[in-house]
Amino acid sequence: MVKLDFEKVYDSLDHTFLYNILSEIGFRWKWRQWISNCISSPMLSVLVNGSPTRQFRMERGLRQGDPLSLFLFNVAVEGLSALFKKTETMDLMKGVSFGTKAVHVSHLQLADDTMLFLQSREDYLLNVRRILRCYEVALGLRINFHKSCVVQIGKGGETEVNWAAIFKCVKGTLPISYLGLPLGGHPCSKLFWNDLIQRIENCCVRRKPHAIKWETMCKSKDNGGLGIDSVLDKNKGMLAKWAWRFGKEESSLWKRVMCAKYGVSLNSLKWKWNGGSTSSYFIKGVGVLL
């Protein structure tokens, strides 16, 4: 497993390559021209010894804080996802499979958070590094290998060190932080939550203790409260929503992985959320509500 960290994601994105991606996914010329006017029209000037240089147009980078920038960055990283998929079809890399139905997963992406899942072969890792280099040259997005890490699951020792050396990044161990939450490890262990508990305590220690009951604060404003959502009720609602999504969504990746792991048909309405002793704590948590 390889966790990638992009370096200065909004500063170096090449506009020409971005327009080509927009064209490939079906944006017409007029739409591309509108986007070009939004991100390439500003004129810049650099102060050299206190004197401004001649003005020039932006050819790289997106403005942080602009709602359009987040959308355009997500479009840009779709190109990297397409490269990984094409490489996998050419047998130059291979992800991991789940269950008897062999649902393959090679990578997960959410904005600039990218996680790769590769089988333990040196040539696969070398091919991924070549892909990232080509992507960097084309789009301008560089991988910060000093903050990226390689975590080998199931096997350890010398092979894991070699993987980190080939990829020129650090060697990681489970649990690691992904999307702000711990990934891997045992959720029932206190050590698993130590980092999250410490962050919450650091936030609370700077605040004075409240003199009003939490139950009162969770009441509606009409009933004398502040209308703050109950964390317990919010958690129950979010867990129950996963059961709703299982019945609503037809072929999403998470559903295919769950069905392959627990041997359930995609079209089946029957789902044993208790799942027995082999189920994850997430599955058991949903099962308590049903």
Image: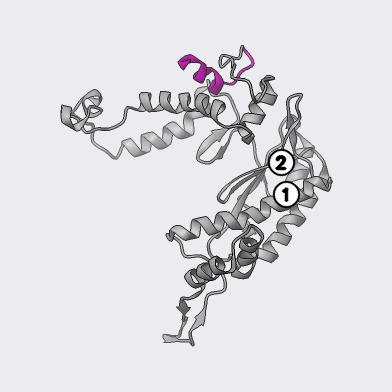
Q: Mark 1 points at which residue?
A: 84
2 or 68, nearer to the observer? 68
Is 167 within the magenta?
Answer: no
Q: Do the residues labelled 2 and 1 touch (CB within 8 Å)?
A: yes
Amino acid carrying mark 2 in the image: Ser
Q: What stretch is highlighted in magenta?
A: 277-290
Name the residue nearer the viewer: 220 or 158.
220
Judged left or right of residue 216, residue 75 is right
Q: Is residue 168 visible?
A: no
| Residue 228 in which image quadrant | top left
Residue for badge 2: 106
**Where residue 42 sits: x, y (%)?**
46, 76
What is the distance, in whole Å, between disc 2 and disc 1 at their CAs? 8 Å
For residue 80, which quarter of the picture? bottom right
Q: Which is nearer the N-term, disc 2 or disc 1?
A: 1
- In the rendered view, tell whether residue 158 sits above or below residue 135: above
The 10 Å Cα crowd at callout 1, few under 14, some 14 to 19, many 20 or more, is many
Amino acid type, label 1: Phe
The answer to whether 149 appears left or right of 101 in the picture is: left
